[in-house]
Structures are given as C-alpha cells and as structure tokens.
Amino acid sequence: MRHDPTTLAVPAPAAPAAAGARGSRAAGPLLAVGTVATGLMAGLFFAFDVSVMPGLADGDDRTYVTAMQHINKAIENGVFGLAFVGALLATGLAAFLQYRAGRRTVALWAAAATALYLGALIVTAVVNLPLNSELARAGDPSRIQDFAAVRAAFESTWVVGNVVRTLLCTAGLVALVRALLLHGRATPLTGAAGLRKP
C-alpha cells in the first residue's frame, strides 16, 4: 500500500526538463536576433557592392583613396562590431539550443547559416582587412605620392572579396529565414519542455 518510492521517483526528471524548457524558449529569440544581425551585415555589404564602390570608382585616385581611408576608420565602432560579431554568436547559439530542444531540422538550417556567416568572416579576415590595413599604411593623403598605385593595389581585390561576403551573408540570411519559419511551425506542437522535433 505504500507508494513512497514511486512518488519520489517521478519528480526527478523535472529539473532537466525545466532547463530544457528555458533553453527552448531562448532558441526562438536568439534565432530572431541572429536573423536581424545577419540581415544588417548582408545589407551593409550589398550597399558597398551597388552604391559605395561604384560611386567611388567614378572618382579620381586621390578621392578614392581618401574616401576609403575615412570609411575604414569610421566603420570601426561599437554598433558595427555588435552586429558583426553578434550575428555569429546569436546564430551559433540558436543552432545549439534548437538541437538541444529536439528541433533538428531548425538546428540544421541555423547551423548552415552559422557556417555561411563564418565564411564571410574568414573572407573579411583574409582579404578585406589586410587590404584595409595596407591602405591605412599608405599614410596621410597629403603625403601620398602615387595615388594610382595605392588604389590599384586595393580596389579590384577588395571589391571581389566584398561581393563574396555579400553572397555568403545573403545565403545565411535565407537559411535563417527558413529556420525561423520552421521554428514558428514547430513551437505550437512542442510541450512545455520543447523536446519534440518538428
């Protein structure tokens, strides 16, 4: 008649389930943050592709070099850094939490977006940042003797690198939109612990 052992055994999984529920609830907002941040970065790179670089290309060498030096300096600010790094962190963590919550398909799309955005960061580190540093080392425009040479060493490679970043970020954004749609469909079907797959 005594059922104390059975009664005590039932609540034991509650703590892990509650932790899973908290992780599952955070997965959606993180996915949204990652999507917004990735969209901002894709838009920034796209703006350079279709307006900034074509506009500068029509100017003279001195204007080009001077403008790009100022742009590279101005973009080093906290708002840009937050979006630049935040896109990777939010998306990667969202992918992990979606996987932990059992939403494997959502996690796969989020992981793909993370990989694509990481590819854009690698291109930035390998191509665009070294060129920015080289341009900065050219020194003050008032002291540059050969603007054409400085521009030639920078322009074409930087533009190609930026196009690649745009494509990678845009593909990552598409993957995140897909992940968000799947997350939205899956959420009403999960229990409080959010442990079911879509």
Image (cartoon, helix red, strand yellow):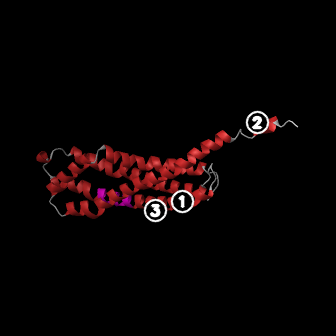
Please report the residue visible at 17 percent of the width from the left and 51 percent of the height from the top. Answer: 66
Residue 139 appears left or right of 41: left
Q: Quadrant of residue 140?
A: top left
Quadrant occupied by the C terminus: bottom right
Q: Are marks 1 and 2 in contact (CB under 8 Å)?
A: no
- Does the magenta portion include 165? yes
Q: Is residue 96 visible?
A: no
Among numbered discs 3 and 2, the one appearing first in the sequence: 2
Q: Disc 3 marks which amino acid?
A: Val
Q: Disc 2 marks which amino acid?
A: Leu
**Mark pair 1, 2: CA separation:** 36 Å
Among numbered discs 1 and 2, the one appearing first in the sequence: 2
Q: Which residue is mark 3?
A: 174
Name the element at disc 3: helix
Quadrant occupied by the N terminus: top right
Please identify the dominant SS of the magenta region: helix
**Mark pair 3, 2: CA separation:** 48 Å
> Farthest residue toward the right?
1
Q: Which residue is mark 1?
A: 184
Q: Which residue is mark 2?
A: 8
Please report the residue visible at 41 percent of the width from the left and 55 percent of the height from the top. Answer: 36
**Residue 183 or residue 64, whichever sits in front:** 183
> Farthest residue toward the front?
1
Q: Which residues are magenta?
A: 157-166
Name the element at disc 2: helix
Q: Where is residue 99 drawn, in percent x and y?
A: 59, 51
10 Å neighbourhood of mark 1: few (<14), some, or many (≥20)?
Answer: some
Name the element at disc 1: helix
- Does the magenta portion include 135? no
Please report the residue visible at 54 percent of the width from the left and 58 percent of the height from the top. Answer: 183
